[in-house]
Image (cartoon, grey):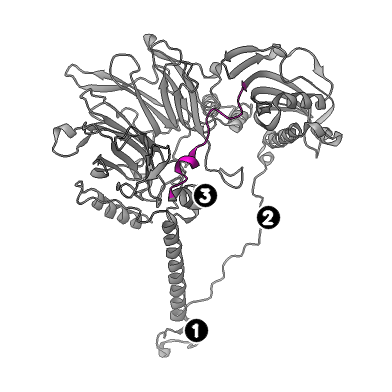
Amino acid sequence: MSGKPRRKRDRRASRLRQHSKESVQLPKHSKSDAQATQTSSIHRSRWMAMCLVAAALLVFVAVRYWPGPSTETRSDPTSKLVDHVTLPFYATGNQPLEEDPAEDGWETEALSQQVSQQWKRMGKLLASANKLQDDELRLLAVPGFSSPLLTPSLSQVCYQDQQTEVRRAETTDFGNEASSDLRTTIVALSEVVGDDLRFTAKVVAIEQDGRRAVTRQWIELSGRNASTVVEQHAIWEADWHLDANKPPRLAAIRPLSWSQTLCQQTSPWLVDCTQAVLGATACYQTQFQIGMNTWLDVSQDTRDDQLLGTPGLAIADVNGDGLDDLYVCQEWGLPNRLFLQQVDGTARDVSTAWGVDWLDASRSCLILDLDNDGDQDLVVAMSDYVVFAANRADRFEIQLVLEVNDPMSLTAADYDSDGDLDLHLCSFRRSETSPGNRQHSASGAPQTMYFNSVDGGRNLLLRNDISLSDKWLFTEASSEAGLEDANNRHSYAAAWEDVDNDGDQDLYVANDFGPNNLYLNQWTESGKPVFVDVASSWSAEDQASGMSATWGDINRDGAMDLYVGNMFSSAGQRVTSQQHFKPDHPKVKAHIRRFARGNTLFVNRFSDNRFQDVSQDAGVTMGRWSWSSVFGDLNNDGWLDLLVANGYITGVDSNDL
């Protein structure tokens, strides 16, 4: 099974290992758009299908009419060359698409699914509060339902400017007055939120006792009221009445926390200008707007976990006109794109002209000055290689190609303080499971320990030695610099920063399936930098599903704080909080429960050699699947805000990840 992929890799490796610009050529996109890629794939598929049909006919003719051994040596001259074989027959089954968790002893999970459906019913009623029907209300709540008004009478202003106001309230701020029925609760809440109402409830805890159940859920509610955009976040505790063969019905709602943002403008803070910027380029309609689902169907790379829709991008001024340009990485078979910004804000596709429309699956890229000549160069991490290209004013020229293993991301800093930028590369899988070598096991395979995996890839520190050579040279310095300690994780991302304010660059690595690394840069007596992993002693391991990391001084005390993107899972929190989940393994249970909590905000207490986890107090754990995160002052008030990119490839079925 591994022979063909290996030979393919060797051919590409021998081609790409040539470092001179005359001999190194990566696959390029020869058309102005991606339709040719799709068309050629379809033609290849048709040609392969025709070949398969022809081969099948040849086999049939050979078996049917090829002359057998001499009849003189056969006892039965009419016998066939191939004996008749009876294959086992399996009747058509009616196995459901989804298993019933109750069959595995998880009645509470089956109940939580029903509760989630009832919350969806609640959302529909909120959206049509002006025409509620009694029979609809009876399907959702029992007679005697009680709840305080879910918008508190008392709240505290925690942020306010000319356009935005943020308020918060605790349980005691809701008062003791209860509404008499569900209708009053729904109408009052919908009047606050207004039109274009959106409601989401995530059940994070559940307990069942006979015909009564209690759930805790995270609530998100938003809408428009006149010229004001309203957004509410709350935690509700709900009592449910259970009847056999009927959906659970609400008996009471108790708000535990609440926050509300009022924005005095009709448009959001961040608006989507993609079409305005890229709409005039051919690839916008023929490629970008089609979406990953289409390209996944026609891609020839069908290996597990390879086509996740996770390529990166980089922004910088590549042609020296003072305007930032854009480089976009893409999946296998789709050309990478370089867009030059025009004076009117639109972009022009110059991918082919600049020689960077490579077709290799690309995960990460950086635009930066690697050779200290004053212009911006390009480095791209592909599925099996890192490509370095020098800026030649109107094109990029490949100077170096390094063969690497399953790269996920790149980050740059001058770690040795010699005046040039060095690179750190995160690798997810080790060599024997590299996609370039052979079909690999999935991330959740049995050999991977979910919360403490040590079968990941080997990250690389690439020292910039261009100044020491007449050609581009990057030296692999991981061992020399002390970065081999715990260098066997499933690493997604890394971020450089001077953590201890000693004037040099330290490194934080976010790992999936295990603890993260915090490498402090400590110089030896000989004047060489050596890194020491202090993540455990500094309380910065954050043992979860690390996918991103960003630094920023959130409290303006002069020390850089850290935000780590993980995965928030309402199902994980719900299951791990129940008594019959791993009752005999409390440590394992705690580890897995930590995985489901979500993102982490660390405040830097470097004077005490530690980080303080303030995630829950700051209310920043729920970032969903946080592939990327960054600090930035979005509203220009002098304080850092957080922007988290999350989600996954959107399918037709909302339950299909």
Q: Viewed as shown, does residue 255 lie left or right of 244?
A: left
Label 1, secondary structure: give it: loop
- Looking at the figure, which quarter contains the C terminus? top right
Residue 79 badge: 1
Crowdedness near tag 1: few (<14), some (14–19) or many (≥20) residues, C-alpha within 10 Å: few
The residue lying at 34 percent from left, 47 percent from top is: 351
Label 3, secondary structure: give it: helix
Give the CA separation, mark 2 to mark 3.
Answer: 28 Å
**Looking at the picture, which amino acid does disc 1 mark?**
Ser
Residue 293 badge: 3
Q: Residue furthest front?
A: 344
For disc 2, the marked residue is 94
Q: Viewed as shown, does residue 425 lie left or right of 295?
A: left
**Looking at the picture, which amino acid does disc 2 mark?**
Asn
Q: Viewed as shown, does residue 481 lie left or right of 161?
A: left
Give the CA separation, mark 1 to mark 3.
Answer: 52 Å
From the viewer's side, name the closer residue of 244 and 628. 628
Nearer to us of marks 2 and 3 is 3
- Looking at the figure, which quarter contains the N terminus? bottom left
User: Which mark sits nearer the N-terminus, 1 or 3?
Assistant: 1
Would you place residue 607 above or below residue 257 in this image?
Answer: above
From the viewer's side, name the closer residue of 147 and 431. 147
Q: Is residue 565 visible?
A: yes
Res 255 → quadrant: top right
Crowdedness near tag 3: few (<14), some (14–19) or many (≥20) residues, C-alpha within 10 Å: some
Residue 464 badge: none
Would you place residue 213 above or below residue 63 in this image?
Answer: above
Give the CA separation, mark 2 to mark 1.
Answer: 41 Å
Label 2, secondary structure: give it: loop
- Residue 498 appears at what percent x and percent y? 33, 18
Q: Is residue 542 visible?
A: no
Residues shaded magenta: 262-281
